[in-house]
Amino acid sequence: MSSDSWFADAADARKYIAEIGRVWIVWLVGLTALLRTSGGAAFAVGGTLLVAAFLLMQPLQHRVQERFHDESDGRSVPPRKSLSSRDRALRELTYGREPFAEAISRNGWWRALIAIPWVVIVFTLAAGAGIAVEWLSG
């Protein structure tokens, strides 16, 4: 795997899509559940969502670990930056468009699928606004 490439081959890219797909699906289902609950149930759903997200992120965290396994400074934060190289890589893998687009391209899938991260981001923002309005008004 080159330093510019996120994936070793098409199989690795498919594995990533499965990993991130699980994260996104649980996230979107959890946000939908939060929109439909209130009171103590909302706290239970929110707590469950956080635990599930933490567990589902582990494969992506392992990818970052493998990418920076030989770099001693992957954890240091450069001057005038707020994230380390590892943190930026995890953020990119989680909701960045470049790794997802590369995974789609490596597998030769329909190019329009690269819009999926945007769909997840827009739904997250809309659900967050809906949750805030619901909680503030109720």
Image: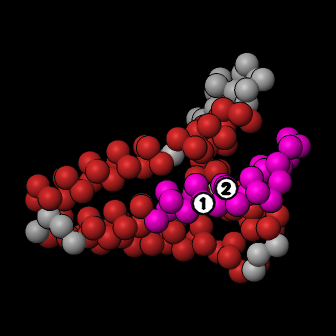
| Residue at 39% in and 73% down | 126
Q: Label 2 amino acid?
A: Lys
Q: Is residue 88 visible?
A: no
In the rendered structure, find residue 15 and report the number of the disc placed on it: 2
Q: Main secondary structure of the magenta part?
A: helix
Q: Picture quarter containing residue 11? A: bottom right
Q: Is residue 134 left or right of residue 51?
A: left
Q: Is residue 133 left or right of residue 93?
A: left
* Image x and y of residue 136, in percent: 17, 65
| Residue at 71% in and 34% down | 66
The residue singled out by tag 1 in the image is: 18
Q: Is residue 15 magenta?
A: yes
- Residue found at the far right of this picture: 2
Which element type, helix, strand or loop, lies under badge 2? helix
- Residue found at the far front of this picture: 11
Q: Residues within 10 Å of mark 1 (few under 14, many from 20)?
A: few
Whether tag 1 and tag 2 are in contact, CB under 8 A, the answer is yes
Q: Nearer the viewer, residue 48 or 4?
A: 48
| Residue at 46% in and 65% down | 25
* Image x and y of residue 94, in percent: 58, 52
Q: Picture quarter containing residue 128? A: bottom left
User: The magenta stretch spans which residues?
Assistant: 1-25
Mark 1 to mark 2: distance in Å? 5 Å
Which element type, helix, strand or loop, lies under badge 1? helix
The quarter of the picture where the N terminus appears is top right
Q: Is residue 47 visible?
A: yes
